[in-house]
Amino acid sequence: MEIMPGVHQFKLPIPSATLADAGEMVGETNVYLIQGKDGWLLLDAGWDDPRNLKILEEGLDAIGVNFKDISKIVITHFHYDHFGMAAKLKKLSGAALVLHRKESAFIEAMGGKARQTLRETNSWLLRNGTPEKELPDISFATDLGRPDILFSGGERIPTGLFDLEVVWTPGHSPGHICLYEREKKLLFSGDHMLQDITPEVGTSPLQYDNPLADYLSCLKNLRELEVDLVLPAHGPAFTHFQRRTDELIEHHQTRKTHILEILQSGTMNAYEIAARMHWIPQAGGIAWDKLDSLNRRLALLETWAHLRLLQEEGKVRTITKNGCLYYSLQIEG
Ligand SMILES: [Zn+2]
Ligand SMILES: [Zn+2]
């Protein structure tokens, strides 16, 4: 689908809901093909699945573009529904694979170091109160491809028709990037901002200090940009950029307040706190006992991210008991 002259969107399905990206309950990834004078730019690569490759092939065919016409594959972040097919597409096109430098460590963590990552993740989950029977046993040990160019944020990618600015937006993942077209007032928002889904924040507890603080400060900074159209990685494009920003900030504020209310009844670990809340707001809020173990993990990570921020703000404190981490309200004075 041509969103506007020079910007094409392909919807690539995410095959298994249980493995889908970060509890977003999304069925497909929006991949964008942006026209250039000396080569096109592909933003995100979709889940690695033969059906997705076929959709892309046919889509390119329909607009008379060949894989070889693509000179850059830019990845918004390392989640598998965005990065999965990157190695394959790089091989087919000969394009340079580009992402933020903070994401490259995670690609290793999911590829060659997958076993170690799983071990470390599980010990973190146990420490935060997850019962042993809910621990994950999946990992992605596939060839994920090596990046050719690493961004830090602030770079420009001129295609000849679009002047794209790299905006580093940590939060949903440490090296998440958006692309901004200042003149056309376009924001390719990746998973940083979606229309009707609240992006999950807190995916990488092992290597990531205070993701929610980062996320909120990026939202506030980005709010100053002039944006007429947001092109997200899931769901429909939308125009109410500033209102959506405010809604997301408000959502996290409400959740923080709720956690403080829960902690009024005593000291708890992150798992116990998460179990007292409703999750997946876009589905109307689902009770803990209705969540599968993957969504419980995501809810735990999200709770942890809020606790981490509350701790930084001096509102909660942590206590370690028998190797487990507990939280209680910080008593003032
Ligand atoms: Zn996603
Ligand atoms: Zn994501």
Image: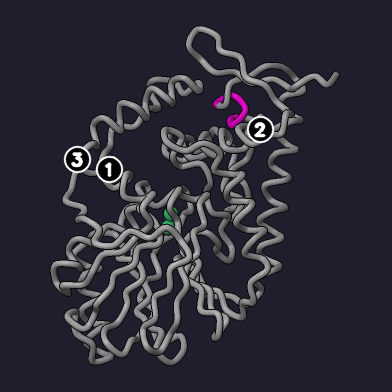
Judging by the rendered image, the residue that carries numbered circle 1 is 110
Name the quadrant containing residue 11: bottom left
Whether residues under marks 2 and 1 lie with C-beta atoms below 8 angstroms apart, the answer is no
Counting from the top left corner in percent of width and height, residue 49 is at 22, 61
Q: Residue at 22% x, 44% y: name it.
A: 111
Check disc 3 and report its element: helix, strand or loop. Answer: loop
Q: Is residue 4 left or right of residue 12?
A: right
Mark 3 closeness class: few <14, some 14–19, many ≥20 residues within 10 Å:
some
**Residue 172 at x, y = what percent?**
50, 50
Where residue 132 appears, as percent x and y from the top left, is: 39, 20
Question: In the shown orientation, is residue 102 left or right of residue 275?
Answer: left
Asked if the magenta segment contains residue 5, the reply would be no
Mark 1 residue element: helix
Q: Amino acid at mark 3?
A: Gly
List the residue tagged with mark 2: 312
Residue range (magenta): 271-275
In what element is the residue under mark 2? helix
Is residue 40 depicted above or below 263 in this figure?
below
User: Which residue, as the protein is rendered here, is positioned at the far top?
Assistant: 322
Tell me the crowding category of disc 2: few under 14, some 14 to 19, or many 20 or more residues within 10 angstroms, Cα based. few
Front disc: 2 or 1: 2
User: Mark 3 = which residue?
Assistant: 112
Q: Nearer the viewer, residue 108 or 192?
A: 108
Mark 1 and ligand 2: say if the CB distance to the nearest ligand atom is below 8 Å. Answer: no
